[in-house]
Image (cartoon, rainbow, N blue to C red):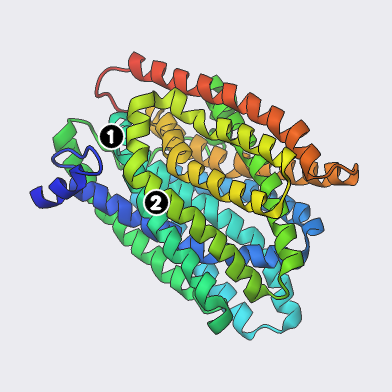
Amino acid sequence: MPERQGVLSRLIDVRPGEVAALLWASLFCFCALFAYSILRPIRDAMGAESGVENLPWLFTATLLAMLAVNPPYAALVAKLPRVRFISYTYRFFGANLIAFFLLFLYGGATIQKWAGGVFFVWTSVFNLFVVSVFWAFMVDVFTREQGKRLFGFIAAGATVGAILGSSLPAFLAERVGTTWLLLVSVVLLEVGVFAMRRLSHFATALKTTTGMAREDAPIGGGVLAGFHRTLASPYLLNVSLYMLLYTFTSTVLYFQQVDIAATSFADRAARAAFFGKVDLAVNTLTLITQLFLTSRILGALGVALTLTILPLFSLLGFAWLGVMPTIAAIVALQVTRRASNFAIARPTREVLYTVLSREDKYKAKSFIDTAVYRLGDQIGAWSYAGLGALGLALPAIALYVAVPISAVWVANAFWLGRRQEQLARDAEPGSRD
């Protein structure tokens, strides 16, 4: 595909033999985030309906759900080839969406209210599992060196999907309602499965190009291996700490945004439209950064310095919010912070896993991306509620809680990046698990 390679090489450093795999990976990522981004504003609108005072309980339910689904997922990983367990995972969530569609369409007011709370929890589980499984597949298919060059572009596929996904609720929710949008996500998940299967096929071609094996045999191991291996590894424990600090600070901002939406908009459709527009702004800024800056930043700064960008930005942003706690400042910080996470921190964080074993890539990574992620949400949710009960307003929370936590996060990110670079140097050139 010399023509395609010529066009892509103007944006990223793509090598011969990588184009087909890169495009199928981008389509897979596009479908996964398109499907979720349709659901996110609907979930947030239902969360606002419940009231910010009830969000900690919804976050608690989400954490428990994450802990419950991790062992069955690990069992699938242990026993099935990756193509099969990824297909089963995506189709399981697609079947769930059809069930929600029927409940929202035909259920009475009481059933719909109950289903709305369940949908909030379910969507939070869906998001992390679908995205974590996708990236686990990426770090299994591509090498560390390829990840530094290509993950930014692949993540751009996610951003395009997220832009389209957030556009649907933003412009259609008040016209057609939210229920029918669920079926669009079902179709997208199935297209994502097809793209994943094609990518698995082209992974064999990567073997010829790079001289590195691309295994598709069952990984084996125990159903609690992700938990045990994370606790036993200082490296993975610090990845977990990075995730906890990120989610804690994200939850503080999220609660403020939900509170604003609950008081500013009268119904679910209007709130969904508001959240959709915020997501649209995030995704547009993210796409511009991913296409033109991500791979260049990662290549120029390396993993360690690039990984500190989001914590440093958060530290400065919370300090600014402590001085100027306005609605516009909250939304601006939310948009720019999320964009820097998706465009820079997320692709860089995935590179951390490329130096690990296949079992760690699928099991420990899934545990960190889901259960640890939601544990951070949980800590942030109840801490926010506790700080509010003590009478602390947003400026005090930003200055005296979020800023010091962000400083710890900076140090953690730098250590992780340096450790990843050391592990990569210690490995044999071109070796794979």
Left or right? Give the position of 369 relative to 391: left
Alpha-carbon neighbours of circle 2 within 10 Å: few (<14), some, or many (≥20)? many
CA separation in Å, label 1 and label 2: 20 Å
Q: Residue 143, relative to residue 276: is it above or below?
A: above
Left or right? Give the position of 283 relative to 228: left
Along the line of sight, the residue nearer the viewer: 361 or 243: 243
Alpha-carbon neighbours of circle 1 within 10 Å: few (<14), some, or many (≥20)? some
Name the image quarter holding the C terminus.
top left
Left or right? Give the position of 152 relative to 333: left
Between tags 1 and 2, which lies in front? 2
Q: Quadrant of residue 383?
A: top right
Q: Position of residue 168 (x, y in %)?
A: 48, 71
Q: Amino acid at mark 2?
A: Leu
In the picture as drawn, the residue positioned furthest to the front comes out as: 324
**Where does label 2 land, which residue?**
287
Q: Quadrant of residue 122?
A: bottom right
Report the residue at 67% width, 73% height from top.
Answer: 268
In the picture as drawn, the residue positioned furthest to the left comes out as: 2
Q: Position of residue 429 (x, y in %)?
A: 25, 19
Is residue 119 something that shows in the picture? no
Along the line of sight, the residue nearer the viewer: 312 or 80: 312
Q: Position of residue 411 (x, y in %)?
A: 58, 21
Q: Residue 89, relative to residue 401: is it above or below?
A: below
Left or right? Give the position of 60 relative to 273: right
**Where does label 1 land, which residue?**
146
Report the residue at 46% width, 32% height from top.
Answer: 360
